[in-house]
Amino acid sequence: MAQQRRVQLSTQRPTSTVCVLGTELSLDVRGSAPKDAIAFHVQGTPGVKLYVVHETQSIKLPSSVCRWPLATGTEVLLAMDALSKDVGDEKVRISYFGEASGVPVARAMLYLTCVEVSLDADTSRGGAVSRTLLDKTTWTWGPDGHGAILLVNCDRDDPRAELPDNRDTTIRSYADLKDMSQMVLRTRGPRTIFTGHRLVLHVDFGNADKVGVFYGGNSVALEEYKHVLGGSKLAYAVKPSRHQEESIFYVEGLAFPDVGFSGLVAFHVTLLEGPEKGLLETPIFTDTVVFRVAPWIMTPNTAAPLEVFVCSVDDNEEFVAAVGAVAEKAKCPLTVCPLPENRQDRWIQDEVEFGYVQAPHKTFPVVFDSPRDRGLKDFPVKSILGPDFGYVARQAPEGASSLDSFGNLEVSPPVTVQGKEYPLGRILIGSSFPRFGGRRMAKAVKDFLLAQQVQAPVELFSDWLHVGHVDEFLSFVPAPDRKGFRLLLASPSACYQLLKEKQEEGFGEAAMFEGLEKVPKPTINEILANESLRKFNNYVQSCISWNRDILKRALGLAEQDILDIPQLFRGDVAMGAEAFFPDMVNMLVLGKHLGIPKPFGPLVGGQCCLEERVRALLEPLGLTCTFINDYFSYHVLSGEVHCGTNVRRKPFTFKWWHMVP
């Protein structure tokens, strides 16, 4: 339905107004009628389309009826299809008639100027701004959806700048402009009409701190681009150029979707009619366009690796070399965070999570900085944030716990659950559920993840672990069949079964941890005879089985999609569980190349029976297993290979706006 505006008429003097292309004017024929008038006649010049609405019917003029009763409900509507060449070049005349009068008792004259005022963005999501018949005032999901998209401009295109680009109000480079979405104001018609009218671009007060708008006028020089909207600036008066019909604005997002912010932002342009002396301007037309701020998106283990990160500390030279060798096999660049930057903090998985943001015109990676803030605290800002590499962080004002580290933040590959598609997978976080009390992920982090909408989080039970991270008992690896992946779960049951098999084969005296100095070396017989260890692992297995059931329901998995990786744990219920030997599910996944913690299991026929079993499970999937010795450099410090590495991965080919959350 066309935007409609009521226009008051006068029989005392001619009235002039603007008709915006695509809108209708409703003429108040009864309000200006003389007291003794009972009927009216209306006629207009050829550029005006006239309709009389009488007794619920709309009749286009001219018609066989020449006079219309001034009855309640009778209405005159007009529209214009062509732009005016001059101010007031089209007109409408209303003639009023008294009872049995052949001569008009009064006339009202309306002079019209047709202009175009349109605020447009890339609502069709094709990568460029274009005129469209789509409803600009709404934003819809799905492959047939529409609505413009905005990136949070959270990279730092100027290396000399101290802060991300979304924290300043200046344009420092043309690269900065390319991160922004264009919004085009089109004004056509007699240019002199805009001297008596004002055009105001404005944003709703509640969203003003979520966006920034820049405008360079007719110039392409960077210094001419000014911050005109956003923050404390709620409105900007636009002065249309005499020589250009389009004004191009550049829009940046300042904040990701979060509690109290859905991600939707509406911009409006309003045409104001000049006031009579002592009065305020009157709004006569508003056009609106709605943007959605693009969410932060995580990538799963199964996505192609682009860059591997590892920290170099005093005692992990061999570990760094081993990770580098796996990265080289995967043809993936390795970035080593040096000691001055990590300050003896080796747990790079816990400090950050790599993801990305995407709009039709641009995609770039964004690192999510955890509230953990230990030795690696400054690394994301100082060494990762940069041109086309963004940064976002959340704090935990209530105080960060171990569950706020991002070893406790994973995402599944794409899944379909009972017909519901999750084409970007589902985020997995650990919690104290179903236990009463205990540790939980910080509200600010959890709220942020929920607000992104596109990777609906699943809460798992991880507080039974000493450290409490989901990556201690699960991982995903690519597979050539079924769903395209396998879920790996740590399994005490599978480990006891394997050790029992080896005992029955006559290898009960084979010992763990051969080759490691000053480490107790229990035999298979001793492990199987340790009732307290078995009892504790029965408890651990029950915790993992609880999560197994949640994951099967939440990810739509069958048993064939899950592989049980033999693993034992030690500890007690009060202090939580830790891996008894290096935790093999806590692995580095680089395509088909896996860097797995070396378990130092019992040697059977010269081979580690734990390694042999894991190879038998994973190599049929086309995966290559490399076992990395992390015992003294990571395992004894309560972490493994995955905890000590991080991977930036290729974004999904699926466009997030094509999904229906």
Image (tube, rainbow, N blue to C red):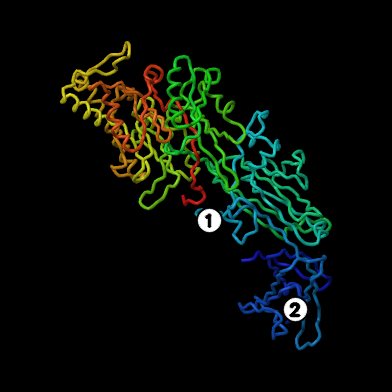
Looking at this view, name the residue that lies furthest to the top: 518
Q: Residue at x 73, y 82 (%)?
A: 39
Image quadrant assignment for residue 61? bottom right
The tag on residue 42 is 2
**Can residue 123 be seen?**
yes
Would residue 90 appear left or right of 297 to someone viewing this image?
right
Considering depth in this image, is 623 or 267 the residue closer to the camera? 623
Q: Give the SS element for disc 2.
A: strand
Would residue 321 appear left or right of 258 to someone viewing this image?
left
User: Where is residue 516 shown, x and y percent of the image?
Assistant: 32, 14
Image quadrant assignment for residue 601? top left
Would residue 188 appear left or right of 253 to someone viewing this image?
right
Residue pointed to by mark 1? 145
Which residue type carries mark 1? Gly
Which callout, 1 or 2, points at the residue further toward the start of the chain? 2
User: Where is residue 210 shown, x and y percent of the image?
Assistant: 61, 42
User: Where is residue 374 shown, x and y percent of the image?
Assistant: 50, 22
Would residue 79 appear left or right of 506 to someone viewing this image?
right
Which residue type carries mark 2? Val
Height in image: 506 above or below 112? Answer: above
Height in image: 191 above or below 205? Answer: below
Image quadrant assignment for residue 170? top right
Q: Residue at x 33, y 33 (%)?
A: 435
Considering depth in this image, is 214 or 497 the residue closer to the camera? 497
User: Where is residue 261 shown, x and y percent of the image?
Assistant: 55, 44
Q: Nearer the viewer, mark 1 or mark 2?
A: 1
Label 1 and label 2: CA atoms lie apart by: 43 Å
Q: Residue at x 69, y 83 (%)?
A: 63
